[in-house]
Each structure stands twice: as structure tokens, then as C-alpha cells.
Image: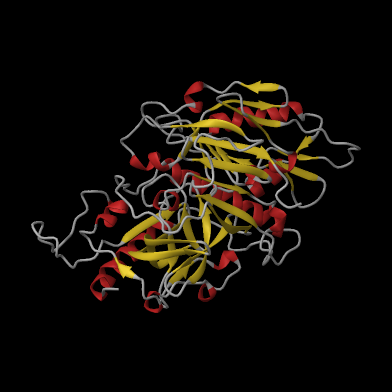
């Protein structure tokens, strides 16, 4: 790693740290809360706040996204590669990947809402504000490049540098007429909701038991804020893991959040395409096509997985949501994306109010817990004490083609503090802009709502498949 980049890198890093934290976030997870009364509320508040902050970043991303370039194909011919996927109390799901020669195995947050794969890197790696994860920052697993014989810093004129910075990347000190420039690819700074990371790009070997991916572009982060692990970017950008591996599809089944921070895991399946027929559907799954965002002024929107959400039902009642929120317009605003990096599903305030009001109307026999809503950031919340039986209307998302995601009750309501109170696990913010709060995607389908579903991203056929499935038998 060239030492000439470190002063400039740290200068950029400290600028990003100063502006990264925009909302207060409790540093306590449910494993470290000291008060038995406040602990569950603080944990839910933290997850609600982080989901909202994540949505704000996805809706107004600032990173510059590149054009796609030719990539090295994986060696070997394994049809499906499996990696364990487990739930974490900070709201994400973790997958372990092995890089380097010899291999170093590092846990990553599985994230379909971003594209770069990066790991905490070097023995000098620092993480500020990471105590909320329950890990001491010094205990965060990190990759050590000097211990890998296959680790290479990517040069500025290397086409792989353009994966993150685009074709017009500035190579300071390089003569454009020569290809022998030794200047490295510029440092990166990326923001994820309440957190950020900064580092440089490496070329490394990505290792699976039956598959090796040489010259994989990966971020070597030197410093991060509020990022308890590296990020495995599964978005649609050219630097993402699916694109670099040339995957035909990938799928997962997210275990229930009651398995947070345990050894329970399920498989994340990465399909290289040699084991299935093109166009074939997985038995039992309902499919809906992905859609494109028609706005190209913000290239970041192009890496999101947009879905054709047509209707939302609360019980048998269709919620009358204006079409401008369901489909992205020519300005790029509106529409629905699916994002494993968001915990609770986010809805723009006008959409959320229509859904929340319908739940309140159909559950009017239960008293509202307004104070609990303020504490947790969730709502509506209801007191169900003294009721012999509780009736909660179903929440249904209907997509283009008729595919319906009829959510189990545990995927959209949760007990809070005791068995007496329940809250809807969908969030919104109070943002009101000149466009009426419509900036970027209006609805973000989070991981909490995907629990115990077999979910498939069929990249070859550009469609999204899903079916209810008990992930742990």
C-alpha cells in the first residue's frame, strides 16, 4: 500500500467523520441495555432511527457511480456457492467471505442497497461510534494486506479504478499519454445512513470452497464511523459482488430476528448459472419483474433493485396510494426498492399516513399508545391488555403480475416492552420538501419484512421471486 496516499486519505476521512452523524442514535443494543424497562424501547428506537437514516441516504445518495467495465470471470465451475447468513442485533444480516492468499475470513453486512464490497483493513483500522454493536472497536475483524501474497493496490489508470469512480477519474500526476503511471486509484469515502467509511481499492482473490474469483475489486477501509463490520455490496453497480462474479441469480432466507447474535444461520446462495436452464423458475416462487428508474441524472438510483409495487392492502381494504408514489417519475422520485441493508420498511410520509390510518381505523377497539410511539419511533402502537383474542388486519403488498406478499403478523407487528403493547414495524420521517417529500424511492422494503421468506434476485431474467418459508425448521 503506497504511503503517499495516507495523508490525503486521512484528511478526507476526518472531513467525512465531521459530517457523517446527523441523528442521535442510542449506543445500546438489547444485549447491553442496563434497565429492564428502557432496554426494549431503546433498542427499537435505535433500529427505527437507523432505518430512517438509511432511507434518507438511499433517497438522496451523494456518491458518484461509474459505467460498467469488462471484468475477469471466476475460475472453476461451481454451479451454486453457499455462504452462511446470520442475523445481528444492530439490524443487519452477516455473511462471511474469504479474501487473500492464504485466505482471511471476514464477516460482512449483506447489503442489496449498495455495491462496493469493503472490509476493515490493516492493523491501524479505526472505527468511531461502533460500541452500539456490542463489539469493542479493537475487536472488529480486519483484513491484513501484508499477510496476503495476492493483495495489490489498484492503480489510477487501471480500468478497475473506473468501477467506482467512473471513466473520468482524475489521476493527479499522471501523464495521459502513457499507461505507465504508478499513481494509485484515489481514496474513496462512502456514506451509509448514519455511518461512513473511507479507504483505497485493492485487487484481491475471493475464495470459496469450490470457486475462486481472481482480481476481485474490494475496498480496504482505514477508518469508519458506526460501521460494525464491512459491507458486502450486492447492488446493481459494476463493482458489486454479483456483477464481478457474473452471477445469474442469488437467493436467501432471512431467519427471524429472535436469532440475533446467535450461531443460527441459513445459506446465501450464489448461482453462477452452470446448474440451471436459462429462463427457468424456482418451484414455488411468485415472480414480479424488476423495473428501471427512468431518471439517469442520479446514477446511484441505477444500482437499486426497483420493484413494480401496484397495491397495498390492510386487511381486505385497498389503501388508495397516489400513483406518483408507486412508480418512479421522470424526475427519478417515487417507486419501491428492496433493500436488505434497511431494517424496517420505510414509506414516504403521505404513504405511511394512509397505511397507518387504515390500521388505526380497523383496530379502533384497542387504545392507542401515543407515548410509546414517541419513545420507540414506531406507530401506530396499541394496548391489547385484557383482550381475550386480538384481531390484526393483514398487510399485503401486490406487485405487477399479481404476485402478492401476504406478510405474516410477526413481520409487521411486534410486542413492545410487554405482552400488553404492539407496534407496527414500518417507519417514516417528517421530511417535507418542495416536491412534497418525494425524493428518491418512496417505499423501501426492509429486511424485517423479509423474515422467513425465500427471496430470489433472478439477475439473468431481471425479476424478483419470493415465497413464505420457515427458514429454520
Residue 30: x, y in percent?
68, 61
Residue 346: x, y in percent?
56, 40
Residue 124: x, y in percent?
40, 77
**Which image quarter holds the N terminus?**
bottom left
Residue 324: x, y in percent?
47, 24
Give the residue at x 66% y 46%: 451
Give the residue at x 73% y 31%: 394
Give the residue at x 58% y 36%: 465
Q: Nearer the viewer, residue 455 or 330?
A: 455
Horizontal side of 402 relative to 308 (left or right) equals right
Q: Nearer the viewer, residue 19 or 409?
A: 409
Horizontal side of 58 relative to 455 (left or right) equals left
Vertical comparison of 409 with 224: above or below: above
Vertical comparison of 227 with 145: above or below: above
| Residue 439, quarter of picture | top left
Horizontal side of 218 relative to 353 (left or right) equals left
Q: Nearer the viewer, residue 362 or 35?
A: 362
Q: Is residue 200 visible?
A: no
Furthest toward the right, the residue is 388
Q: Nearer the viewer, residue 33 or 238?
A: 238
Figure colour scheme:
secondary structure
| Residue 427, quarter of picture | top right
Amino acid at each position: 500500500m503506497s504511503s503517499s496516499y495516507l495523508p490525503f486519505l486521512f484528511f478526507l476521512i476526518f472531513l467525512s467523520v465531521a459530517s457523517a452523524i446527523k441523528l442521535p442514535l442510542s449506543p445500546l443494543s438489547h444485549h447491553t441495555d442496563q434497565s429492564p424497562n428502557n432496554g426494549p424501547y431503546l433498542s427499537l428506537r435505535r433500529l427505527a432511527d437507523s432505518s430512517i437514516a438509511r432511507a434518507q441516504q438511499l433517497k438522496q445518495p451523494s456518491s458518484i457511480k461509474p459505467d460498467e467495465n469488462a471484468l475477469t470471470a471466476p475460475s472453476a465451475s461451481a454451479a451454486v456457492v453457499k455462504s452462511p447468513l446470520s442475523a445481528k442485533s444492530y439490524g443487519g444480516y452477516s455473511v462471511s467471505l474469504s479474501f487473500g492468499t492464504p485466505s482471511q475470513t471476514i464477516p460482512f453486512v449483506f447489503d442489496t442497497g449498495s455495491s462496493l464490497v469493503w472490509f476493515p483493513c490493516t492493523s491501524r483500522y479505526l472505527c468511531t461510534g461502533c460500541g452500539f454493536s456490542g463489539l469493542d472497536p479493537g475487536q472488529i475483524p480486519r483484513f491484513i494486506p501484508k499477510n496476503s501474497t495476492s493483495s495489490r493496490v489498484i492503480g489510477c489508470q487501471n480500468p478497475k479504478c473506473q468501477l467506482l469512480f467512473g471513466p473520468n477519474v482524475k489521476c493527479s500526476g499522471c501523464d495521459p499519454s502513457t499507461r505507465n503511471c504508478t499513481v494509485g486509484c484515489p481514496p474513496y469515502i462512502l456514506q451509509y445512513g448514519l455511518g461512513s467509511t473511507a479507504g483505497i481499492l485493492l485487487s484481491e482473490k475471493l475464495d470459496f470452497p469450490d470457486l475462486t474469483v481472481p482480481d476481485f475489486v474490494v475496498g480496504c477501509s482505514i477508518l469508519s464511523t458506526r460501521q460494525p463490520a464491512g459491507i458486502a455490496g450486492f447492488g446493481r453497480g459494476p463493482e458489486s459482488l454479483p456483477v464481478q462474479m457474473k452471477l445469474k441469480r442469488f437467493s436467501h432466507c432471512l431467519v427471524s430476528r429472535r436469532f440475533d447474535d446467535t450461531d443460527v444461520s441459513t445459506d446465501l446462495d450464489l448461482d453462477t448459472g452452470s446448474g440451471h436452464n436459462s429462463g427457468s423458475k424456482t418451484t414455488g416462487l411468485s415472480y414480479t419483474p424488476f423495473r428501471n428508474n427512468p431518471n439517469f441524472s442520479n446514477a446511484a438510483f441505477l444500482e437499486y433493485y426497483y420493484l413494480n409495487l401496484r397495491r397495498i392492502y390492510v386487511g381486505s381494504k385497498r389503501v388508495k396510494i397516489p400513483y406518483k408514489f408507486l412508480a418512479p417519475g421522470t424526475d427519478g422520485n417515487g417507486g419501491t426498492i428492496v433493500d436488505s441493508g434497511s431494517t424496517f420498511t420505510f414509506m414516504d410520509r403521505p404513504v405511511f399516513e394512509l397505511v397507518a390510518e387504515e390500521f388505526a381505523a380497523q383496530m379502533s377497539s384497542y387504545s392507542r399508545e401515543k407515548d410509546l410511539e414517541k419513545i420507540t419511533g414506531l406507530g401506530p402502537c396499541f394496548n391489547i391488555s385484557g383482550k381475550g383474542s386480538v384481531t390484526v388486519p393483514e398487510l399485503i403488498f401486490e406487485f405487477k403480475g399479481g404476485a402478492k406478499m401476504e406478510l405474516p403478523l410477526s413481520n409487521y407487528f411486534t410486542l413492545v416492552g410487554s405482552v400488553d403493547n404492539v407496534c407496527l414495524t414500518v417507519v417514516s420521517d417528517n421530511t417535507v420538501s418542495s416536491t412534497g417529500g418525494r425524493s428518491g424511492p418512496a417505499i423501501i422494503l426492509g429486511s424485517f419484512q423479509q423474515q422467513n421468506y425465500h427471496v430470489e434476485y433472478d439477475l439473468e431474467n431481471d425479476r424478483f421471486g419470493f415465497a413464505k418459508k420457515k427458514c429454520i425448521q
